[in-house]
Image (cartoon, helix red, strand yellow):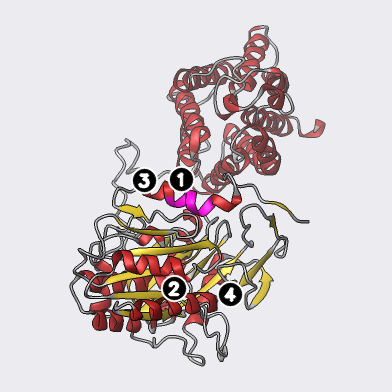
Amino acid sequence: MSYRGKKLINDPNDVVTEFIEGLVETYPGLQYLDGFPQIKVVLRADVSGTTNDKVAVISGGGSGHEPAHSGYVGAGMLTAAICGDVFTSPPVDSILAGIRAVTGPKGCLLIVMNYTGDRLNFGLAAEQAKSEGYKVEMVIVGDDCALPPPRGVAGRRGLAGTVLVSKVAGAAADSGLSLADVAIEAKRASEMVGTMGVALSVCTLPGQVTSDRLGPGLMELGLGIHGEPGAAVADLQPVDVVVSHVLKQILSKEIQYVPITRGSRVVLMINGLGATTIMELMIAAQKAVPELQLEHGLAVDRVYTGSFMTSLDMAGFSITVMKSDPTILQHLDAPTKAPYWSVGAEGDRPPAKIPVPVPPSCSSRSNEMITQPQELSEQGCILEAAIQAAANEIINLRDKLNEWDTKVGDGDCGTTMYRGATAVLEDMKKCYPLNDAAETVNEIGASIRRVMGGTSGILYDIFCKAAYTSLKGSPIISSKQWASALEASIAAVSKYGGASAGYRTMLDAFIPALTVLKEKLEAGDDPLTAFLLSSEAAMNGAESTKDMHAQAGWSTYIAADLLSLVPDPGAMAAAAWYRAAALAVKNKLQPSQS
């Protein structure tokens, strides 16, 4: 099913010119030629053809690949970038205008990605500029490693490796080299770089419908940066598998796309294609570096991770590997004012990074070995059953909690609680001193603190710490002491979290539970009966959050009519584990009635 893609634009025909205007408003060092809409050229504000005493480096192509190429205009990289319409080669007149605007006596180098339209338009502009007396050289970059040779007249496509070539050429020009020498440096760099991309979706051109060529669960290997079909469509795989496959293709010994062999030194670029998060790109990077080192025997000198050459809103990434040497590294590390060059990756990197040790804890129990007792007391057995039942209930509720939280929060309540529950079960097997209820509660808090992030994690840690403070020092815990511990926990969570009854939080499960528990115990009811009735009150309280106006947490940002559709996930989680613990205690104390 195809649908019109949603984009934050005005007229689709104006996206490139409006982008350029926004770019130069953002960066004082950039300017553009006054030739809209036919001529779309971004150039350094401090350079003109009459004053430029260095080789001008010019690149460009169709728009839609931002930040390439206009984001790389700046001292030490590109002198100008020629922008075509989206995915359309810029016309000859635009390229000529750019050459004339920034080229001085030392001439200019055109860095052109290997697409037929770009080669023809830049080539004709170069010939015209030469006829006007300009010194012009052109280097064509074809770094695609997805499709095996021969590629006929077309050759290998230009991809993200072009960014590295532009940086090398820009630094060479900035150092004062001649046009011939700058061209040699750029040409050599272009011959040492290989790239391959993987896409999870195709891109949507402004004002057009989104293609459904790639369905759910599929990825495309070797997809072009204009959305053109790649080498193969395959089932979606974990990123480690994808990275391994891509690197093997780029470094293929049979095809030899790049002159890289075991023992070589390389530069790595992980490039997002437009809709890929930094988190995903960094996950790819953490796999790619050791893969290059251990599987391919390469030394990794630099790693660049980010979105350098995109394809509008395409989800996916490309990997670029360039053979490095001292000259290449010097050019890559040379300073530049290009706004989108990765400035934090320069400098020698160690072969391996050893994490910094965690500072020792100042806890009074930090040096004590906490272990599970060899034989459990009656209270220890009951406590173990209650903890196990409560944690398993949260594990079983993960998807339902996430479903609710997607509607009224950030969608991860179930996943966060699941992490805490699984940690509790795992740690209970090894180190909970179950015969000591207070210390066990304290260790539950420690388990939760270690794995549960966000607000829920810290609130449950506070919950457990307050209960521990209330319970410690008593070898046998009475039912009224448990009620006092619950009261202390509620008070602490309310104090530090700011919520109270009716705020649509987990306290709306705990407060009714405490009320019933105290009433029944003070009335002389059996403690088990009081616990069970209080668990029912907790569940009723959690369900009642549907009718509450949120005054704390993510739900405060959600419209009231949406909140009324589902209960608060945090309250439901609290009621669920509390109820499960109560039933487990009942089953332990009254097994014949369960």
| Eye-nearest disc, 3 or 2 | 3
At label 4, the amino acid type is Gly
Q: Any magenta on residue 18?
A: yes
Q: Secondary structure at mark 1?
A: loop
Stretch of the chain drawn in magenta:
15-20
Label 3 belongs to which residue?
26
SS assignment at label 3: helix
Regarding mark 2 in the picture, which secondary structure is present there? strand
The mark found on residue 320 in the picture is 2
Q: Where residue 432 sits: x, y (%)?
A: 50, 41
Q: Nearer the viewer, mark 1 or mark 4?
A: 4
Q: CA distance from mark 4 to mark 3?
A: 34 Å
Q: Between marks 2 and 4, how big is the CA–CA gap?
A: 12 Å
Question: Is 234 placed above or below 180 here?
Answer: above
Mark-to-mark CA distance, 2 and 1: 50 Å
Which of marks 2 and 3 precedes in the sequence? 3
Residue where numbered disc 1 is placed: 371
Q: Residue furthest top?
A: 523
At x 57%, y 56%, the residue is 313
**Residue sitting farthest toward the front:** 132
Cα gap from disc 1 to disc 3, whole angstroms: 59 Å
Q: Specify whether 357 is left or right of 451.
A: left
